[in-house]
Amino acid sequence: MLTLDARKVGDMTGHQLLELLGIIRNGTWQDHDSADFTTGRHTWNVYTTTARGKQHGTYIHLWTEIERRIVLQDGTDTGSRVKDCIHLRGKVNDKIRELQRAS
């Protein structure tokens, strides 16, 4: 599994990341091809999808599991943690740092 610098990944386009991870082979890829990489703190899963209609095009998805702190409204950290994930999605030609958070 590749370990990449998070800042360098942010400057890449989705297409460049897909090539680096070996998802693009011989200039092509298929929906839901996936690969993993680490940024030191997190292991990210990367995969592709294709949309039709109004939002047509190829999209790149990045997601990772994280732990969130549970903080009360007054700012008190309860010490408890809950598992969550970060899921980013955008067109394959967008820069990674410009991807939008998916729900």
Image: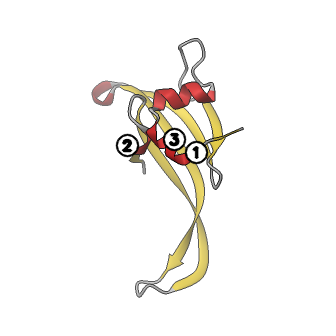
Gap between marks 2 and 1 measured at Cα:
17 Å
Residue 5 is tagged as 1
Q: Dividing the image into 4 quarters, which one contains the N terminus?
A: top right
In terms of depth relative to the viewer, which is nearer, 36 or 3? 3
Q: Gap in Å between the C-alphas at discs 3 and 2?
A: 13 Å
Q: Is any part of residue 33 visible from this angle?
A: no
The disc labelled 3 sits on which kind of residue? Answer: Lys
Residue 74's place in the image compared with 101, above or below, is below
Q: Is residue 23 above or below residue 85?
A: above
Image coordinates of residue 54 in percent, x first then y, are: 27, 28
| Residue 55 seen in the current view | yes
**Circle 2 is placed at which residue position?**
98
Q: Total label count?
A: 3
Find residue 52 and report its horizontal and vertical position in percent: 36, 25
Residue drawn at 61 percent across, 48 percent down: 39
Is there a contact, CB below 8 Å, between mark 3 and mark 1? yes
Q: Which residue is mark 3?
A: 8
Vertical order, 78 against 91 (above or below): below
In the rendered structure, which amino acid carries the disc numbered 1? Answer: Asp
For the residue carrying disc 2, how many other residues have a C-alpha within 10 Å: few (<14), some (14-19), or many (20+)?
A: some
